[in-house]
Image: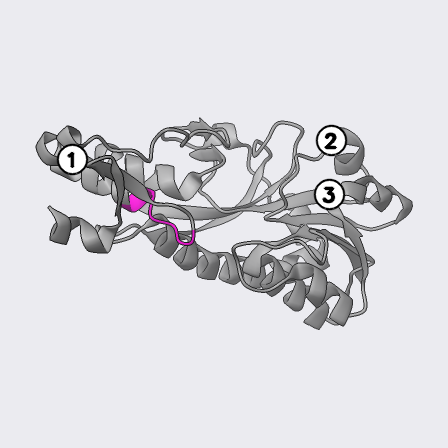
Amino acid sequence: MIDVAFFGSHPLGEACLERLHAHEAVSVPVVVTYPEDEEHWWDGSVNRLAHDLGYDVLPIADERDVLDYEFDYLLSVYYPNILGPELLDHPDEAAINLHQAELPRYRGSNVFSHSILNAREDDHWRHGTTMHFMAEQVDAGDIIDRRFAEITETDTSRTLYEKVRERSIELFEEMLPKLVSGEVLEMGTPQSEYDGERYFYAKDSLDGAKEIPLDELVDGDELAVYDRIRALDFPPFEPAYTRLGGEKVYLTRTNYESLF
């Protein structure tokens, strides 16, 4: 039997928590997530699910109260905060994160958008999901395992998010028995052993990217504009736009060709 403190959100967080709950050799002493009454763009609620399953639930603001619990693993899935060394060192075995991008290629935020933006120039038409040990530096710990989804010419950042969620669930299901057995503790590979480009994007990395001037839209690099529109197409958030007569005209993958 192992004890897992779960830090998470999003539908992927729900899917992973459900699989932890269903495993007879896993106990979840505490779940840390958004408050129950906090609204988000995604459907579902890790908070509601955790309460339904009978777990202790802490809001993100009280994450340090986890130090009052004893557990083998801290597992993070779409948790918004950067955890400090005291929390990372608290588990008896390890702190592990399920990161929605290919490490070491993509660290940080807005990874689905940047993966589409970079795909053509880098000729790298895949987006990954990575289970890795957590370190004080964000997304820098040793890699446990990865899975990949193809980036197609018609993907938007939202469709890519949905595809990678399925790969993430598959990866989590495959790694869960290794977590229970302890085999996972011997699976870490330093990120320095991987080849390829490496990017880090802050949360504000797309600030100012949504407005596409009309002259760039009409006379610019057509594929670059198309990729930018796809990369910023993530409902329900505001997509890319141009201005006609001072008014915003929104640009999505589906309406781009019909507009121009």
Image quadrant in which the N terminus is located: bottom right
Q: Is residue 198 left or right of residue 93?
A: left
Amino acid on which the number 1 mark rests in the picture: Leu
Rendered image quadrant of residue 206? top left
Residue identifier under label 3: 94
Q: Is residue 248 left or right of residue 219?
A: right
**Residue 15 in view, yes or no:** yes
Q: Nearer the viewer, residue 243 or 6?
A: 243
Residue identifier under label 1: 217
Q: Is mark 3 on a helix, strand or loop?
A: strand
**Disc 3 versus disc 1: nearer the observer:** 1
Is residue 232 one of those drawn in magenta?
A: yes
Distance from disc 3 to disc 1, alpha carbons, whole Å, reads 49 Å
Q: Which of marks 2 and 3 is nearer the N terminus?
A: 2
Residue identifier under label 2: 84
Mark 1 neighbour density, 10 Å: few (under 14) some (14–19) many (20 or more):
some
Q: Give the range drawn in magenta.
A: 230-236
